Amino acid sequence: FSLAYGFGGQLALGQVAVFAGGAYITAIMFNHGITDLLLAAAASIAFAALLGVIAALPGLRFAGWSLALVSFFLVLLIPNITDLFSSQDGGVLGIPGIIGPTLFGQTLSTTALYVLTIASTALALFFFRNLVKSRYGSGLLVLKHGPQLARSLGLSPFRTRLATYVLAA
């Protein structure tokens, strides 16, 4: 949210839909016996990015609150979408009895999963910090202040906003 709104100037109210999509994909994979955490994380990230593109493409075509409304409507669709796939995801009741994750064929203990969560969070924070401090981050701040100014510096406002929203997803 901080990347999309704080640096990109895009109000995105639907990040919870993106998180839910990634979580459901991971849980469905685990229930089908695919418990490798790296594979599940890659699938979750890819699905979240796809949801980000689906929400951003129509919302970024207009100005102002349109992205916020489009992403918010995506949140409103979550119960309907989960009901469509209730045989896979349990509907709005969720997925009971998810199998524990593995990493390189070894089942992760609670402590190992906690350490891995802390390490991956630190890695993500490091990535986003470097992204914000880079030339791309400076371009985002310029774009936040005005698309004409960004165009004068050679940035495509639409592509930059789309990439930022997908990265935030």
Image (tube, helix red, strand yellow):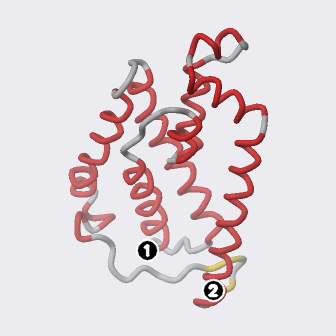
Q: Amino acid at mark 2?
A: Leu
State if disc 2 and disc 1 touch (CB < 8 Å).
Answer: no
Depth check: give the residue in front, 135 or 46.
135
Residue count near mark 2 (Cα–Cα under 10 Å), binned few <14, some 14–19, many ≥20 = some
- In the rendered image, the vertical position of residue 23 relative to residue 146, given as above or below: below
Identified at 41% across, 35% down, the residue is 55
Disc ID at residue 55: none
Q: Where does residue 135 sit, x and y in percent of width and height?
A: 78, 32
Alpha carbon distance from label 1 to label 2:
16 Å
Amino acid type of disc 1? Asn
**Horizontal and vertical percent position of residue 108:** 63, 86
Where disc 1 sits, the SS reads helix
Sort mark 1 into few (<14), some (14-19) or many (20+) by Cα contacts within 10 Å. some
State the image quarter where residue 73 is shown. Answer: top left
In the image, taking residue 59 as reference, residue 157 lies left or right, namely right
Q: Is residue 48 left or right of residue 125?
A: left
Q: Nearer the viewer, mark 1 or mark 2?
A: 2
Q: Which residue is mark 1?
A: 31
x and y percent of residue 1 in the render? 50, 48
**Image spot of residue 81 (x, y percent):** 27, 51
Q: Quadrant of residue 82?
A: bottom left
Residue 148, by quadrant, is top right
* Mark 1 or 2, nearer chain start: 1
Q: Is residue 70 above or below residue 72?
A: above
Q: Which residue is mark 2?
A: 108
